[in-house]
Image (cartoon, rainbow, N blue to C red):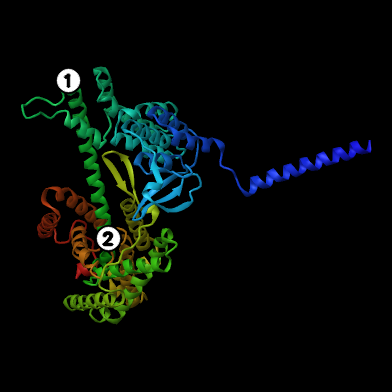
Amino acid sequence: MKQLILWISRLMSVLILCLFTSVSHAQDEPAMPAERESLFKQLIDARSNTQKEAVINQIANSGMENTVEILRALQNGDLYYTKDNDTLVYTAKHPDGYSVTSVETGEALGVVGRRDVRRVSINNQLRGVLRGLIAEIALRSPDENVRLQAAQNLVRSPAAEFLPAIDRALATEESKKVAEALRLAAAMVNIHSDEQADRLSALEAMRGTLDSDVMSLLAGMQLKDSDGNFLEKDEQVRAVAEEVLIEMRSSAELYKLIENTFFGLSLGSVLLLTAVGLAITFGVMGVINMAHGEMMMLGAYTTYVIQQIMPNHIDISIIVAIPAAFLVSGAVGIAIERGIIRHLYGRPLETLLATFGVSLILQQAVRSIFSPLNKSVTTPSWLSGSWEINGALSLTYNRLFIIVFSLIVLVGLVLLMKKTYMGLQMRAVTQNRAMANSMGIRSAWVDALTFGLGSGIAGIAGVALSQLTNVGPNLGQNYIIDSFMVVVFGGVGNLFGTFFAAMSLGVANKFMEPFAGAVLAKIFVLIFIILFIQWRPRGLFAIKGRSVGD
C-alpha cells in the first residue's frame, strides 16, 4: 500500500512537471500555427498553377492578419523564399541584392544575395485570381467605408474575375450605399458580356447613377470609327446606352447648377464676413477704413500663432482662434480709433490717407515678425474632406462651415445691435450724436467700441479665410475692394443689405466665371455696381444714419 501511494505521488509529480513545462514553453516561445506553416510550405513546394491557386485560396481564407500583405507581395512579384531553409520572405531591392523580411514573424532578416533567394512565380491567370481575392477581402471588411472604397475601385477597374466576389458580397451586404456601388461594379463588368440580355440589364442598372466612369463608358459607345461605323455594333444596346446617357447628363447639369450655387453662396459668405465689419466702421460710423483688410490679416495670423502654440490640438485650435482673433483685431482697432481716427472725424479724405498709412505699417510689421513668405494654416480634421451626395455633387466641409459661420456672425451682430444696451447706444449715436450726448451717452467711447467691434469681426473673417487660403501680409488687400463694393451695393450701414449684396455678388461671380473668367467676371460686377449706384446712390437698402444724413 505504501509503495502504491509512493508510485501515485511520483506519477502526479511527473504530470505536474510536464504541465508546467508545456505551459512555460507556450508562454516563452509561441509556436507558429501549424496550419500557417503548412500553407507556406505548400506554396513554396507547389509546382503547377493549379496547386498554387488552391494554396492561395486557402491563405486568403485563413484569417491571418497579414493575408492581404502576402497576397499583394505575391501579386507584385515581391514574395520569395530562401534557398537554404525555405523561409518565405518579403523582398525589397538593395544594391547588394535584396533586403528581406520574414513573412512569418515580420522580422527584418538583413540583406541577401540575388542567388540566395528564389521568387514564388505566378502567371497572369494567378494575378487575376489574386486581384479578385484582395478585392473580396476588402469587401468583407467590417468597416463600411473600406467596403465602399473597395466597391468604387471595382467600378473604376472592372474585370470579369471580380464578378464572383461581387456576387458573394452583394448577397450579404447590408449597407444600401455599398450595395449600390457593388451593383454598379457588376454592371460595369456585364456591359462587356457577349449576351445582349446581360448588357441591357447592365444598362438598366446604370440608369440613375452619375458616376463619371459610367458616363465615359456610355459616351464611348456612341463614337464612330474612321469609316463612320459605330464602335458599338449592337443597335439596340447603343440606343438604350444613348437614352441612359442623356438622362445622366440632364441630371449632371442640374447638380452642376446646384454646385455652382453652393460655391457662389460660399464666396458670398466670405464676402459677408469681410464686409460686415466694414458695414459698421464705414456704414455706421462713416469712417473710410483702408486698414480694414489688415484687421482680417491679423485675425488670420492669430490663427497661425494659435496653431503654433497648440501643435498637438489642431482640431480645437480654430475654436480657440475665433475669440483670440476677435480680441487681437478689436484691440488694434480701438487703438487706431483712439490714436488717430478720433482726431479726423468729419474729414474723410484725411481719414482715408491715415488708415492707408496704418495698413502699410501693419503689413510691414507682419513681414518683419513672420517674414514676407506666406504661412500655411492646417485645416482641422473635422473640416477636411467633402460631403459626397452623388457622383456629380460634393460639398466641401470647410465651405459649409464658412456659410454656417457667417450666418451665425450676422445673427449675433444683429442681436447685439438690436437687443443690447451697447447696440442701443451705437444706434443712438449714429442717428443723432447731439441728442445722444445730451442723454448722457459717452459718444467718444461708443465710437471706440464700435470701431473695435467692426475690427474684431474682421479678425473673425481672417480666421475663416485662413481655412481657404494661405496666410500672408497681402491677405487683406485681396478683399478690401470687394468689401467696399458689398457695403455700397447693399446700402451703407444696413446689415440686411450687406447680407443680400454679399450673397448676390458671390453667386453672380460664380455663374459668370465659366463664361468670362475670374478677372473679367469681377470687372463686369464692378461695372454693374457703378451703374447701379448711379440709379440708387444709397444702395439697395438705404437707412438714415449719421454718414448718410450728412
Q: Is residue 267 left or right of residue 178?
A: left
Q: Can residue 177 be seen at all in this image of the molecule?
A: no
Q: Nearer the viewer, residue 161 or 155?
A: 161
Q: Is residue 421 above or below residue 440?
A: above
Task: Determine the residue positioned at 38% across, 31% down.
Answer: 179
Q: Tell me where residue 114 appears, x and y as whole percent.
A: 36, 48
Report the disc number at residue 64.
none
Extreme residue in the right direction: 1
Residue at mark 1: 234
Left or right side of 242 for 205: right
- Does residue 136 appear in this view? yes
Task: Point out the residue furthest to the left here.
Answer: 227
Q: Which mark, residue 469?
A: 2
Residue drawn at x 35%, y 30% as measured from the top left: 162
Residue shown at 29%/28% (left/top)?
189
Find numbered disc 2 in the image and state the secondary structure of the residue it sits on.
loop
**Above-or-below relation of 398 to 167:** below
Quarter that holds the C terminus: bottom left
**472 or 95, which is in the foreground?**
95
Instruction: Give the CA distance from mark 2 to mark 1.
Output: 51 Å
